[in-house]
Amino acid sequence: MSVTPALGELLRRAPVIPVLTIVDAKVAVPLARTLVAAGLPVLEVTLRSGAALAAIAAMRAAVPEALVGAGTVLDARQLHDAVAAGSQFLVSPGFSATLCTAAQGAGVPLLPGVATPSEVMAARAAGLDTLKFFPAAQAGGVPMLRALAAPFPDVRFCPTGGIDLKSAPDYLALPNVLCVGMSSVAPAVLLESGDYGGIGRLARQAAALGPRSGA
Ligand code: 3PG
C-alpha cells in the first residue's frame, strides 16, 4: 500500500498542481494518466461538480503513481466524503479551524487558503506552516508573497488563482513558494473534446517550469 508523503514533500514533487474540475467521471483516468506521464503527479480535483468524488476514486484505483487531492473543501461533511473517496490531501479556499480539526482527525493533510497576515497567523496557531495563497493574483500576487516572507519566514505557500504558464515562473522564483496551482493546464475546452494530446503538451510545459527557489 502506498504511503502519502507529508504536505511539504508532496508540494515539492512538481512545480505545478493542476486544479481540475471534472464534470464527467469517465475522463478522470485518461486525464490523470496524461498529467502523470507529462510530469505532473500531484492532482487537485475540485468538489465543484457532481462527478468529483467518483473521479477521485477512479484516479486512485487506476493511477497509483498520482497523488490525488480534493479541492474546494468547504466543510467537515465534504472533507469526510473526500477522504472516503480516497483523497490523499485536501485543499480549501480559506482557513477554517473546524476544517483543520477534521483533517487532523482524519489523518489527511490539509492545504488551507489564506490571503492576509491574520489568516496566516490563524493557520500557524493551528499548527500549519504550508498554506495555499488564494486567490493569488487578485490578493497581491508576487509582491504580497514577498511581503509575507518577512514576518513569516517559516511559512511556505502554494499560490493559486489567476496564475498561468506565463506568470508561474515569477511565483516559482520566490523562496517561500513550493509550487503553484492552476486550472489552465487542463482547460474545459480540451477536456470536453477529449484532446489529451493538447493537455499533455500544456502539462509538459508546466512540468518544465522553473526555477523553484522554495522547493
Ligand atoms: C482554484 O480553484 O484553486 C482556483 O480557482 C484555480 O484558479 P485558476 O482557475 O485561476 O487557475
Image (cartoon, rainbow, N blue to C red):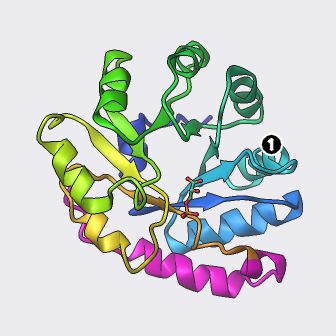
Q: Give the range drawn in magenta.
A: 189-215
Locate residue 92: give its quadrant: top right
Is disc 1 surrounded by few (<14), some (14 to 19) or many (20+) residues within 10 Å? Answer: many
Along the viewing direction, whichever of 186 and 26 lies nearer the viewer: 186
User: Is residue 71 placed above or below 189 in the rendered structure?
Assistant: above
Tell me where residue 199 appears, x and y as whole percent.
64, 80
- Relative horizontal placement of residue 162, taking residue 128 as reference (left or right): right
* Label 1 near ligand 1 (CB < 8 Å): no
Q: Is mark 1 on a helix, strand or loop?
A: helix
Amino acid at pointer 1: Leu
- Relative horizontal placement of residue 57, taking residue 116 as reference (left or right): right
Residue extending farthest left: 150
Tell me where residue 84 appears, x and y as whole percent.
76, 28
165 falls in the magenta region? no
Ligand 1 is found in which quarter of the picture?
bottom right
Q: Mark 1 points at which residue?
A: 53
- Relative horizontal placement of residue 54, taking residue 147 as reference (left or right): right
> What residue is shown at x 41% (from left), y 34% (from top)?
6
> What residue is shown at x 75% (from left), y 22% (from top)?
77
Report if residue 64 is visible in the image. Answer: no
> How many numbered marks appear?
1
Tell me where residue 165 appears, x and y as whole percent.
43, 77
